[in-house]
Amino acid sequence: MAADPQTENTGAEALKRAFREHPAGVSLITAQTPEGPVGLTASSVASVGLDPATLSFSVTRATGSAGGILAADTYLVHLLDARHASIGATFAVSGSERFTAEQGWETLPTGEPHLPSTRVALRCRTLHSLGVGASVIVVAEVLDAVFGDTADPMVYLDRAFRTLAPVE
């Protein structure tokens, strides 16, 4: 049975189809909660402004890891690169094994779980949040950053992590 073109070109299906072929950077957002560390992979992180230094991201629901991050005073937004495809995939699946010794986690003096092998981890606090249906959009102030070694960038495109090649 063929797909209905009307359904594919409207609403949620149209949005999913459009963004499936639009590359996005990959981030890992982590926080410490009273129950322990939480984290999730996000492709919605974007720079908002410099005064104050702010970024934005969205989460699908305010429960589980997302709820822990939304409730935390501060959290880290790690900008992932090609070295981190495996950990990005792990944190994209609910119930997967996270924060293992093999993954190389440390804790910052401020308490947030930190993956030191990333290019940068931005320590943030929420300035504003807005519920939109089942999602929450967050505008966060960047308090400081922990920089590491750079590597090849990674994007999420058509349901897969990919690297970038120069345009010639």
Image (spheres, grey):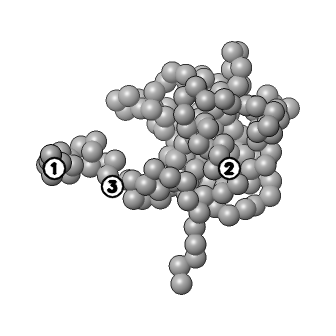
The residue indicated by pointer 1 is: 2
**Upstream in sequence: badge 3 or badge 2:** 3
- Disc 2 marks a residue whose amino acid type is His
In this view, the residue in front, 80 or 143, is 80
Which numbered disc covers residue 167? Answer: none
Looking at the rendered image, the disc whose residue lies closer to the viewer, 3 or 2, is 2
Q: At 76% from the left edge and 39% from the top edge, which residue is drawn? A: 103
Q: Position of residue 26 (x, y in %)?
A: 58, 50
Looking at the rendered image, the disc whose residue lies closer to the viewer, 2 or 1, is 1
Residue 23 sits above or below residue 146 on the image: below
The residue indicated by pointer 2 is: 84
In this view, the residue in front, 2 or 19, is 2
Q: Position of residue 66 (x, y in %)?
A: 55, 28
In this view, the residue in front, 141 or 57, is 57
Which numbered disc covers residue 18? Answer: 3
- Category of crowding for the residue at label 2, using alpha-carbon neighbours closer than 10 angstroms: few (below 14), some (14–19), many (at least 20): many
Looking at the rendered image, the disc whose residue lies closer to the viewer, 3 or 1, is 1
Q: Of helix, strand and loop, which one carries label 3?
A: helix
How far apart are the alpha carbons under marks 2 and 1?
A: 38 Å
